[in-house]
Amino acid sequence: MNAHNHFMAARSSTDEADVVLVGVPFDGTACFRPGARFGPHGIRVWSEVLETYSRPFDADLEDLKLADAGDLPIPPADWQKASPVIQREVRKVLERGSVPILMGGEHLISLAGVQAASRVFPELVVIHMDAHMDLRDDYDGNPLSHATVMRRILEMTGPGSFWQYGVRSGTREEWKLSEEKGTLIEDLGTLHGIVGERPVYLSVDLDVLDPSVMPETGAPEPGGMSFPQLHQAILACRGLKVVAGDVVEYCPFPGGGGPSGAVAAKVVRELIFLAAEGKQVL
Amino acid sequence: MNAHNHFMAARSSTDEADVVLVGVPFDGTACFRPGARFGPHGIRVWSEVLETYSRPFDADLEDLKLADAGDLPIPPADWQKASPVIQREVRKVLERGSVPILMGGEHLISLAGVQAASRVFPELVVIHMDAHMDLRDDYDGNPLSHATVMRRILEMTGPGSFWQYGVRSGTREEWKLSEEKGTLIEDLGTLHGIVGERPVYLSVDLDVLDPSVMPETGAPEPGGMSFPQLHQAILACRGLKVVAGDVVEYCPFPGGGGPSGAVAAKVVRELIFLAAEGKQVL
Amino acid sequence: MNAHNHFMAARSSTDEADVVLVGVPFDGTACFRPGARFGPHGIRVWSEVLETYSRPFDADLEDLKLADAGDLPIPPADWQKASPVIQREVRKVLERGSVPILMGGEHLISLAGVQAASRVFPELVVIHMDAHMDLRDDYDGNPLSHATVMRRILEMTGPGSFWQYGVRSGTREEWKLSEEKGTLIEDLGTLHGIVGERPVYLSVDLDVLDPSVMPETGAPEPGGMSFPQLHQAILACRGLKVVAGDVVEYCPFPGGGGPSGAVAAKVVRELIFLAAEGKQVL
Amino acid sequence: MNAHNHFMAARSSTDEADVVLVGVPFDGTACFRPGARFGPHGIRVWSEVLETYSRPFDADLEDLKLADAGDLPIPPADWQKASPVIQREVRKVLERGSVPILMGGEHLISLAGVQAASRVFPELVVIHMDAHMDLRDDYDGNPLSHATVMRRILEMTGPGSFWQYGVRSGTREEWKLSEEKGTLIEDLGTLHGIVGERPVYLSVDLDVLDPSVMPETGAPEPGGMSFPQLHQAILACRGLKVVAGDVVEYCPFPGGGGPSGAVAAKVVRELIFLAAEGKQVL
Amino acid sequence: MNAHNHFMAARSSTDEADVVLVGVPFDGTACFRPGARFGPHGIRVWSEVLETYSRPFDADLEDLKLADAGDLPIPPADWQKASPVIQREVRKVLERGSVPILMGGEHLISLAGVQAASRVFPELVVIHMDAHMDLRDDYDGNPLSHATVMRRILEMTGPGSFWQYGVRSGTREEWKLSEEKGTLIEDLGTLHGIVGERPVYLSVDLDVLDPSVMPETGAPEPGGMSFPQLHQAILACRGLKVVAGDVVEYCPFPGGGGPSGAVAAKVVRELIFLAAEGKQVL
Amino acid sequence: MNAHNHFMAARSSTDEADVVLVGVPFDGTACFRPGARFGPHGIRVWSEVLETYSRPFDADLEDLKLADAGDLPIPPADWQKASPVIQREVRKVLERGSVPILMGGEHLISLAGVQAASRVFPELVVIHMDAHMDLRDDYDGNPLSHATVMRRILEMTGPGSFWQYGVRSGTREEWKLSEEKGTLIEDLGTLHGIVGERPVYLSVDLDVLDPSVMPETGAPEPGGMSFPQLHQAILACRGLKVVAGDVVEYCPFPGGGGPSGAVAAKVVRELIFLAAEGKQVL
C-alpha cells in the first residue's frame, strides 16, 4: 500500500483506538494565504521522516492503538456545511472513549472541535497556543472566522476555563479584552493547580512558532517560539487530562517543499503521546 | 508612486475611461488549488514586463483612456457577500458607458459579471474560452461554483447566445448537455455571422492554455492551446462588439515566480484592445 | 478516507480488476536528478485534478474495474532487491488476467516489467516512447541502468519486436545501433500491420515530452513533443492489444508545485483506457 | 483601490505626515544575489499580514500620520543617477519636519540617506545594524558599493558618531579598522549616555538576522540574531531621537513565497514607532 | 575534478581550440528581473544532462577542439569596466583564429561582442534572434542598455547587414524604425543569397522562445517559438560563415530548478556545431 | 576561470596542501529525500558569499595551503563501487600528511572516511554530531546505510573512542544501545581530558541543526541547534588533533535557492581552521 495514506504507525481501526487522528481540510476564512486544506495530507507525508519513538515521553507510537480516520468529506470553504460534519465526527470519537486530534485546516475548525467536546465534557478547559489573539468580535463583518474563533470559544467556556499561551499579535481591543478576562498564562506549570482533573482541549496554531521554524502558514508573525520552546510548552502540559486537541494552520506551499511539514507532524506526534498519557494508556 | 498599484498605463480616472479594469480577488469555491485571489495583484506586477503597444492591433494603451479601479473590497471566500459587490461595480461601469474587464479571481466571478451585464444589455451573448465545461448542475451539492458557473449562465442566456471554445475536459453528462444545446464552436470566424451587432461578454479562463504555458492556475488540464493559438482566438473576435469581459483563474504560486503572470497580463492587454475596437475608440 | 491513497476511481480489489496500477518507487540509477521514487505518489495526488471521463475514448474510469495496488515495498536504490519484487508483482497481475500499468520510478523498472511480461507472453512486442535511446551497452560500467535498459530489452525481444518513437537524443553509437536494428518508427499507424494481434508492452518515458510540458523529470531534453502530440501517439495505438505498460521518469520537485503531475496522471489515465479497449472491457 | 500600493495604514499625504516611507528600488552593486530592487514592493505586500498595533510600543499606526511616498523613480543599477534623487527626497522630507524611513534596496542607499540627513543635522549619529562590516575601502576597485558604504559614512561622521551592532563577518582589515576606530558597541543601553539628544540615523541591514529568519537577502551570513534579539535591539534605542532611518537588503525570491517579507515589514513598523516616539507624536 | 567548471567536453586549451566559450556574467541594465550574471554557470551545470552528439549535425563535441575560457573577471553591473574586458577577450580569441561564443549575461554584452568582431571582420553581418526589438534610442535616458543594444549595433553595421528574426514585441517607434531599415527577415533560407561568404555574428536572446520553454529569463514575452522552431532557425543558418556569437538572457531562478538551463545549454551546443561547420573543422 | 569550480581560496595543489577538500557526491541510501549528491557543488557555489577570514579563529584561508580535489568519480548510488574510491582518496591525502575534509553526500560516506583514517591512525577517535543516532543494526535489511553508519563505526572503534553530540532522534533500541555504550557526550569541553593527543575524525551531519537553519537536508528533524550553538560546539573542539572530517547531508533543493548552502559552507570553513590549528599550521 501507498505509505502516505495515514499518519505513521496509525494502523488501528477507529473503533478500538486510544487516539484518533482526523483530517479537516478546511480553509474558507483564511485572509492572507489559503492552502491549509492541504495540511492534513502534508502532515501524513512528512510524518515518515520522523521516528515513532519520542525520547522525552520515552514512548513509541507502536505501543498505542492509533487510528487515522482520513480526511473528513467537507467542502473546503463552506463553514455552514463543514461545521456539523466536524462536530459529528469529534463527538463520535469522544463517545467511543477515544481522544480525537484534529489535523487542520485553518483555526476556525477549533470552534467545531470545542463545541463537540464541551457537549461531552461540560467542564472542558481550553488551552490555546498561538501567535495571534483570535479574539475579534467579527472580521470584516463575519463573526465566524479564524480571527474570531477564540472570542467565540471564550464566550462558551467563560474566563478561568480559557488560557492563551505564546500570543504576540493582536489589535488594541483584543489585548484589552485579554487583560480584562485574564486569558494569558505565562508559566504553563501553574496550570496544573488551576485545572486539576478537568478535561482539557489543547489547540496549537502552528504560527505560535517563529516563521523561520514554520514558514508555511497562513499568517506568519515574526518573533515567535523556537521548536524547543514549543516542545517544552507541550511537555509542561504533562499531567493534564487532554481529551481532545488540534494542530492547525499548516499551509503547505505548492512548490516549497520545506520542512514545515516535519514540524507539524512532530507536534502531532507529541500531542498523541500527551493525550495517551492523560488517558493512562502509556 | 509605487508602480505596482495599477495595470501598466492605466492612468485615467474611472469616470472618463473607455475601459475599466476591476480586480476581483475571490477564490472561495476553488477545489484543487486556491490562491486566485492574488491574481489581480500578480497581473498588475507582471504587466510591467510588457510593452503598451500591441503589434497585431497596431495600437498603444497610451492611445486609450484606461482606468484600473483596483481590487473590489470583498471577502475572498464568501460568495453571498462578494456577488452583489461585483454586480454593482460592473453595472456602474457599464452605465457610465465604459467597458469593464474583470481580473479574477476564480471563474465563479463570471456569473456576477454576466448577471450585471445582461441587465444592461438584455441581448447579451457570452463567449467562454476554457479547458473545462463548467456545466455541472451542482458540485458537491453546491449550485454556485467554478464548476457550475457556465450552467447557470447558459440557463440565463439560453442556447444560441452561449458559445464555448477550447474545452477539452468534462464529465460525460457535461459533454452530452453541450451537444444537446450546441454550445461548442470550433471556428470562431463563424461567430460574426451568428452574433452580428449583439453585445458580447468574453470570458477567458486561462486554463484554456496548456499547463506548460499557464502552470499557475487552479486546475491545470494537459493538452491545451499554445499562447499563439489563444492569441489567434482573441483576434478572431475582432469585429464583435465586446461590452464586457473577464480573465480568470490565474493563481500565482507563493514561491514560484514563473511567467504565468506575463501570460495573464498579455491576455488582459489584448482584451483591452479588443474592447476598445468594439467601442470604436481606437 | 484520505483521497490521496489511490489513483482516482481505483476502487476495485486487485483480484477482480481489469487494470491494476502498481507504484514502483525506484530511482537508483538516476544520474542527473533523482526523485522519481516520489512519482507514484505525485501521480495519485494530481489525478484528482482530472475528470474520470476521457473524451477521445468516450469512456469513464467508473465504467471499468480499476485497482491501485499501492507502492511496491522495495528499497529505492537497490536494483538487486527491487527487481524480483517488481517481476513477481507484474507476473501475478498478468496471471490473474489483468493488465498491469507500472507508475515509476525511473526507466530501469521497465526491464523488470518486460521480463515478467515476456514470460507470460513470449510473443511480446515492446513499444518505447522516449527522448533518449537508452541503448548503451553499459553506463559507467553498469549494464543495468536507465541508460541501458532498452539495450537489454532489445536483446530479449530481438529486432522487429522492439519499436522506438519520439527519440531525439543519444550517442553516435546508439543512433548507429538503432539504424542497424531498425528500431525507430515514425508513423505509429503502420504498427498495426506489423504487430497484428501480438501482445504489446507500452513504455512511456515522460521525457518524450518537451521540458516545457514536463519539467519535473530526471533528464529533461529540449525539443520534445507537445502534450497533444503524445496524446495522438497514444491514440494511434488503439487497436493494439496492450497487455502491460509503464509511465516512468516523473520526478516531482520537493513540494510538487508544478503541473507535471497532472501530465503524468493524464498519460496514466489514457493508458488505462487503451489497455481496457485492448482487453475489450470497454 | 488595490491594497498593495502602500504600506499598511499609510494614508496621510506626505506633506502632513509624521513619518514618510520612501521606497528605494536600487541594487546596482549587489555581488552575490541581486533583486533588492523588489524589496519595497514586497514590504508593502507583506505588511498586510501584520497588525497595525504594536504591543511593546502600545501604539497603533492609526494613531500616527504615516505616509508612503511610493518608489523613487531611479534606475535600479546606476548609482550616479540614483544618488541625487534619493538625497533630494530625504532632504525634502526632513525639511518638512517629517522622519524619512527608506525601504531598500541594497545597503549603498544608506550613503545617500546619511549624506542628506547630515546636511540637515550636522551633529548626526549613525547606528548600523548588520552582519557585515561594510568597511572596505574599495570593492573590486569601486569605492561606492554595498561593501564600502559604512567606510564612506565613517569618514563623514568620524569615530564616536558611528556605531555598529551585530557584526559577525568582515575581512581582517575591516576588523582591525573597526577596533582602531572603536565602532562596535555590544550593549546598546550604553548608547543613551553617549548620544544624548543628538539626532540619530538608524540603518538596519536585515542580514543582521540569521538566514533562517531572513533567507531572502543578498548575502546571507549564518550565525545571526533571532527576530526577538533584533526586536530587543530596536527597543533598546527607545529614548534616542531617531530622525531618519532605513531597512535594507530584503531581496525577495521570484514569486516572494517565504515570510521574509513579513520580517522586513515588521522591522519597518517598529522603526516607525521608534521614530514617532523620538518625535514625541506618540 | 568537479564536473561543473566547464561546459561538457570543453577540454581543449584556449590556445588551440576551434571554438572558445566565454562566460560573461553581466546583468547591469536588466530592468525587470536581474540574475543573468548566473547564466554562464547554469549553462555549464545543465550541459551535463545533454549528449555531446547532435543528431541534426551528425557531429560530436568530442570531434572538435572546444575550450571553455571560464567567466570573465568583470563587475556584474558596471558596463564601463566590463565592456573593454569583453572586447579584449573576443578580439584575442578571434585573432587566434578561433570562434568565440559568449554565454551571457544580459543582452548588452552583444554590443561588446560585435564591436570586437567588427574590428577583426569589417564586413560583419549580424543576425539577431529575439522577442524584443531592442531598438530604442535610449532607455530611461541611458543609450547603453539591453533595450537599446540593437539600435547601437544597427548604427554600426548599417541596414542590409543587420537582420532580426522572431521579434514580437516593441514600441511603435521601434516597429517603425525596423520597417524603415528593413531589419526583419521572415525566411532565414533567403539569408544565404544575401549574406554569401561574409562573416556572421549570431546573437540569440533566449527570450525568443516562448516563456513556457524558457521561463527563466529577464523579460519573458508570451507568444514565442517552441524549441523545435528555434532549432530549425539555427539549422537554417547552416552554410553561413559564423565567426562569433552569443547566447544571452538566461537568468536562473535562485536554486536553478527548472530545465531552462538545459534549453540554454542545447542552444549553445548547436551554435558550437554551426560555428565549427562554418570553420570547416567538422 | 569560472569561480565555482573550487571552494573559495582553495588554490593550492593537492600535493602541497595542509587541508584537502574532497567532494563525495553519493546519496544511494537516502530514504526520504535524495539529492545530497549535489551537496559538494552547492557548497562550492555558496562559499563565495562568505569571507575567507574567520573572526573566532582570527585566521584567514589565505594564510593556509588549501586544496579542493574536486568531486570523486563515483556512481551516486552504488556503494560497492563508491566505497573503495573514497577510501583510496582519503588514505592518499592522509599519507601525504594533509587533512582530508569530505564534503558529502549522505552520511554513509563517513564509513569509508573512518575506515581509511583508522588504517593510518589506529588510535582514531570519532566525534559524531547529528540529529539521529544512526545506530541501527540494519535498515530494511541493509547493514550499510545512512541509518546504520555509526553502528558500523562504533563496532570499529569500540566504546570510549566514539562520541555523539546533539542527537535528538532514534529508535528505542538505538537509545538503549547508546546508553549501554555510553556514546553521548553533553559537554564537549570534557573531551579534551578523555581524548588527549589521540587523532580525531569529526563528522558533522548538518541535520544536527534545526530545520529552520538547515531546511535543505535529507531527513529534517525539528528541535535542533541554532547555528551559533553548532559554531560553539566546533569551537569547543579547539585543541583536539583533528586529522580528518566530513560535512554531510546538505541536499540542495532543485528550485529552492535558500541559504542552506551558506550554512554548509561556513561549517566547512570552520572545520578547515579547526584542522589547521590541530596541524599547527596556523
Image (cartoon, coloured by chain):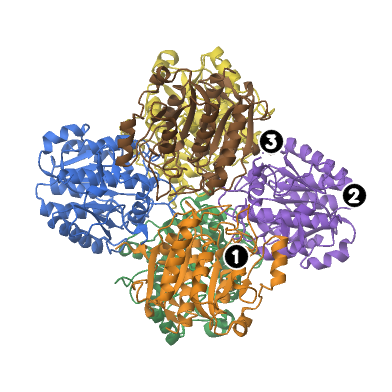
Chain colours: A orange, B brown, C blue, D purple, E yellow, F green
Image quadrant holding the N terminus of chain C, namely bottom left
Q: Earlier in the sequence, mark 2 or mark 3?
A: 3
Give the Cα distance between marks 2 and 3: 29 Å
Q: Quadrant of residue F191?
A: bottom right
Task: Answer yes or no: is residue B60 visible.
Answer: yes
Label 3: how many Cα within 10 Å (few below 14, some 14–19, many 20+): many
Subunit that carries the residue with mark 1: A
The x, y position of residue A1, in whole percent, is: 29, 63
Q: Are marks 1 and 3 on the same chain?
A: no
The kind of residue on which mark 1 rests is: Arg
Please name the residue that numbered disc 2 is placed on: D122
Residue D75 numbered mark, or none: 3
Please name the residue that numbered disc 1 is placed on: A152
Subunit that carries the residue with mark 3: D
Residue D248 numbered mark, or none: none
Q: Determine whether C76 is above or below B19 in the image.
A: below
Subunit that carries the residue with mark 2: D
Q: Are marks 2 and 3 on the same chain?
A: yes
Q: Nearer the viewer, mark 1 or mark 3?
A: 1
